[in-house]
Structure formats: structure tokens, C-alpha cells
Image (tube, rainbow, N blue to C red):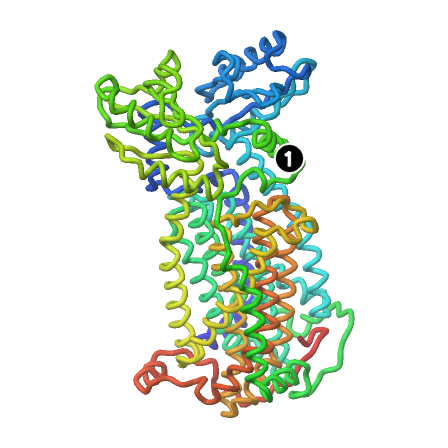
Amino acid sequence: MLGKLGAVLVRRRYLVLAGTLAGLIAAAALGGDVASRLSAGGFQDDAAESEVAARQLDEVFGAGSPNLILLVTAEGGSVDAPAVAAEGAALTAELADEGGVRDVVSYWTLGGAPPLRSADGAQALVLARIVGTDDEIDEIASALSPRFTRDGAVIDVGVGGEAELFRDISHTVEADLVRAETIAIPVTLVLLVLVFGSVVAALLPLAVGVVAIMGTFLILTLLTGVTEVSIFALNLTTVMGLGLGIDYSLFIVSRFREELAAGRDVPAAVRRTVETAGRTVLFSAATVAISLAALAVFPLVFLRSFAYAGIAVVALAAVAAVVTLPALLAVLGPRVDSLRLFGRRQKPVGEGWWHRMAMTVMRRPLPIATAVVALLVFLGAPFFGIEFGLSDDRALPEDSAARQVHEALRANFASSESSALSVVAAGAGDPASIAGDLDAYAAQLSAVEGVARVDALTGAYASGVKAVEAGPESARFAGRSGTWLSVVPAVEPMSAEGEALVSDLRAVEAPFDVGITGPSASLVDAKASLFSRVPLAVGLIAVATFLLLFAMFGSLVVPVKAVVLNLLSLSATFGAMVWIFQDGNLSGLLNFTPTGTIDLTSPIMMFCIAFGLSMDYEVFLLSRIKEEYDRTGDNERSVAIGLERTGRIVTAAALLLAMVFLAFATSGISFMKLIGLGLALAVLMDASLVRATLVPAFMRLAGAANWWAPAPLRRLHQRFGISESTPDTEVALPELAGSGQI
């Protein structure tokens, strides 16, 4: 079928190119403004207890956790000075008049509430809640932040809170994306020229990448009409579009050159390229798409959006590489090497560096495999100490104004008023009739270790007793048929202590049905929600990958080996990420602040992306090994020739893809640094250490069993499976090195 497709592409090459150009123009016109349609939220599981309680708190009581904080610093050193008090009260009233802003309170409007004043008396807080959807909150915060950030003669004002932090992170990521693209594209083009030795050939992967990226923008635009899509999906679209455009183009163009060098004319070379390399690209794309599709099982829109973008960009990159690129090669023919800058001598088969490397490993497979596995296990050991958390202000650069506000809150204020937990009892009944039960329950909550204070309809509580009787401010806790309580923590919300506090509070027996929400509760629920789906995601990836590899190679051993080696390689990468980003090693060099935790969504994303890319390279290598094995039946020779013919391609692709990831690692946001650096390390380690040593070692040890399958499955594959080989494969192709003969 693919051979017939190659023939059609040769005959209809100009029509294919015209159709691609028209589609590209349409995608740019209809999807170019996709960013304006994407969501800034999607980080919560709507079914989690904390999210249900948060919605009840808003809908029933018109209340919620403050997400906007104004940090007021008195120039004279005291927030109680008359001039400062007047300015503070005026600032509070000004913020309260803003549209979309509710529940505005401050140190001054609450009669000098001690928790809202710093220990030295030089700073005080204004707390408020921006209401609306995530996008509306982001829009309002973007308008308020510059207007309320002030340096005055009497007071200075800094803006913080969850809304401001998220706004700052989102805008920083958007700016970093532009900078990363500015770095990645020219650097990648230079490297492509060095790899291909020809300017014309070097432009082909970028063309495939552009088609994949713009097409994905259009698909994401269409998806926004039926579901919420996170704006962070654009980051994956860009990096995977460029990376896979490079991967697939390298494989297609290199095979096309091999076929030309073997003496075929251009039409025959295109057909053969689509028939062999095209098949490999399609299967490689399927493995990557499966890994990214697993993100759709998670309940967060943020992760599901990566699945949408990932599937789209992988599919479009594969189609562009198997359809558009061969049509373009049919037009260019030998001119694909136009504007050649340099050249290298071609080497006969069996003399390349990768061939020698494979033969060296296969002469001593057991000790080499043992040493490399031991090294990978050693590198992966820190992963067993991983601590998961959610990103906070320390994800931002140190010079971020919002981060500086939160640093001051941590250092100068005794309690975390802005991170209070809310205990919601929306259906508890008439507030007056439950006053006795509420009094006892609030006292119990205040006795829990890690609680600074509990505010309720019946008063304020601390250390298990009522400390302050109910006053006018207590009325805010009453609803028509229920009540809620505010629990102010005495521990860092985003920490193990904060998680333990949530568990302890939920363990307190309540006289009515309650739900607990707030930052610490969101962290606990996010962990439970995501980790409960991890086995399903990993299982789907493993099973689907196994079935695909069996369909392509007809072996049970090869898929098992591929999955095990990929997991081993990724464990080493994750160990390095824990050592660097959780433990803080290299934090000075990489310019980030370690928090002792890893953002819990980052490893999930990294695993799905890196596993897919690892299988991508695995399929590239195994397809050439199987092609040679089917031709000769010689296991060692087929491994050496397969590695020889793909080693340079895979290494070049990995290097180029790693450069793209490293460009994104220049982000000022710590979790973006982690993802960029982590994926770069994963790709390089897999394409070099694993492919150069473990694959040939294990295939040498397995011998002919590499391609074993039980007789019934073997017959099933013969009937329905896909073979890389055709009768055409008896042509021995030369080893083509460098400068246009990659």
C-alpha cells in the first residue's frame, strides 16, 4: 500500500504540494490566533472534594479563599501611624470598588487584626477575592496588578496572591516561549546544515515542523468549540512540531539519499523511501501518539490538553513527512543536496564508527550490559526519594515582584491568613439550630496540630477553646441552610506538614457533612486524583506499545526488551531531576530555587513524552535491524548494520531535539526548566548510551530468540502483521556518512 502511495506522490507531486500550501495558509488564517481562545486554567479535578467544596463556598455563601493580596509597607516603619492607616483604608476602599472583586478586607478595616500585621509592625495586608472563571480572573488580575503596584511617600504596595502568581507565571511562560523559539529555530537550522551539509536539505525538517505546528494550531482552535484547552498546550505543540519534524525528515531524507546512491532513479527512490522509511515513520508516530494519548486519562484539563496537542502534532508531522516531504523530494531529486557546503568520503558497509561500536559491545555483551545497567540504576536511585508538590511563588525568578511579596509573607507574618482552609457544611441546616454542635466542632478543629486559629459563626477558636466571642464579622459564616469555617494554618501550606494537616482535619468527626478546600487540600486531592490514574496510563502505554511493536516485528521478545530498556533509561533521567531540582544541586548554575518537592504534573508529562520519543528511536533502529535480518538471517551482522545505518541519524536527531528542549529550559519558571532539561537528558541518554550499548548487548545475548513468537502468534503476524522487508531488500546499500550522506 505504501509503495502505491509513493507512486501516487511521484505522479501527483505538484498537486500534493499545492494542497499542502493551501492547507498551511488556511491553518494560519483560521488557527493563527489560537492563543486567544485557549484557557489559562485547567489545573483542578472538578470532582475532587476540595473543588466541590470550593464551588459550594462560592455558590451558597458567596465566599472563597482570597486570591489577591496587597502587601502594604509603611515608609515610616509603622502601619498604625495615622497617615498610613488613612492610606490603607483608602486603598482598601479603592480595591473594593473594582469590578469582579469581592470580600475585600484589610488590617485597618478589621480594627487592627493582628494576623494581618507583620511581626515588626512595618507591613500589613489587604485581602480580596477575584471572582469568575480562570480566564476572567487572569484578565482582571492583569488589569489590577500594574494599577495597584505603587511606590509612594507614605506607603509602598506590592501585589501577590494566587491570581497574581498565576498571571505572572502564565505571562512569563508566554514570553519564554517566544524567546525559546527565537533561540531554537536558528540554532536548529545551523545544526541541520552541519548534519546534512546542504542548505536545501536542512530546510526540509523545518518545513515539516511548520506544517505540523500550524496544522495543530487549527485543530486546537476547532477543539475549543467543544471543550476547554489549556494555553500551555502551545508549548508542547511548538517543541514537538520542531522535534518530530527533524526526526522524521532525517529518516526520510537519509533513506532517499541511500536509494539514489544505490542507483535508483528519483521515482523509484521516492517509492522505496515511502515503502520502507515511510512505514517506520508511521509506526514511530503511532508509538509517540499512544504515549501522549495516555495523558487524556487524567482528570485535569491541563494534562488532557497535552494529549490533544500531542496527538495532533505527531499525526501531522508523520503525514507531512510521509506525504508532503516525498512529493517535495520527487521535485528536487538530486537537487536536495543543492547549496552543499562541505562533503565527506563515503565509507563502505562495515567500516562506520557505529558498526565498530556494535561489534565491540557484542563481543562482550554481558559485562558491558551489566556495567551500563548498574550505572543507570545508580543514576535513578534518587528517584526513590521523590517528594511531590504543587508549584508556588518560588517557581518564579527571584526578581519577580509577586514572588517578593510572598517571600515577605513567609518571613514576616506569623500565620498564613491568605492560605486558610475552608470547612464547608452547605447542608448542615439552620445556623441557629446547629450552634452547639458547631461550637464543639470548631473547638476540636482548633486543637489539631498545625492549626493557628479557627474562625466560625460562633466565634474564634485556638488550642481547643473559644478565644474570641462571635462579633459582626462572624455573620459572614452563615448561610440559609448551612455554615462554613475558616481554618488558618500555622504550617507552610504547600508542604508535607500542610498535607498532614488536611488529613488530620478530615479525620475529625463532624456533626454534619463537610468538605474541606484551600491550597493544602487542593494539593492532597491533586495527588490522589493523578496518582490513581497513573497505573492506567502506564498500562495503556505498555500494552498498546507492545501490540504495535509485535505488529511490526512479529516478536514477543523485542517489545518486552524495548519497554524495559525505556523504563530503565527514564528512571535514570528522573533520578537526575530529583537530584537537581528537588535536592537543589546545580540550583546556582541553573538559576532556580529548590523547594524540596517536584511539581507533580511534571514527571507525568515527562514520562509520556520521553517514553514516546524513546520508542520513536527504538523503532528507527529495529526496523533497519529487522530488514537486514530478513535479508541475511545473521543476527550479529543485522544488529551491527542496523546500528550503523541508523546510529548517525538517531544521534543527530537526538542532538537536534535536545537543543530544542534546552532552548525551552532557558525559561525563568523552574518547572519549565525541569521539563526542558529533563527531556533533553532523556533523549540524549536514550539515543546514545542505551542505543549504543544495551540494545546491541541484549540482542546479541538473545540471538535468534529476538524474533521469537509462539506458533499461533507467528501465524497471526504472517497474516495480519506489517513487514518492513520486501523482495526489494536484497539490494545492499552503502554506508553514507556526513555532508548530505547521513
| Within-10-Å neighbours for mark 1: few <14, some 14–19, many 20+ | some
Residue at x 51%, y 48% (from the top left corner): 599
Q: Where is 183 relative to 479, above or below?
A: below
Vertical comparison of 434 with 309: above or below: above
Label 1: which secondary element: loop
Residue 139 visible to the viewer: yes
Residue type indicated by callout 1: Ser
Q: Seen in the image, is 212 located left or right of residue 555?
A: right
Q: Nearer the viewer, residue 655 or 46?
A: 46
Q: Residue at x 43, y 75 (%)?
A: 559
Q: Position of residue 591 (x, y in %)?
A: 67, 47
- Image coords of residue 16 (percent x, y): 53, 63
Q: Position of residue 449 (x, y in %)?
A: 41, 35
Q: Is residue 38 above or below residue 190?
A: above
Question: Which residue carries the number 1 mark?
Answer: 400
What x and y, as percent, mark residue 255?
Answer: 59, 76
Left or right side of 345 for 644: left
Q: How many marks?
A: 1
> 310 or 504, which lies in front?
504
What is the quadrant of the N terminus in the image?
bottom left
Looking at the picture, does residue 393 appear above or below residue 293? above
In which image quadrant can residue 178 be found?
top right
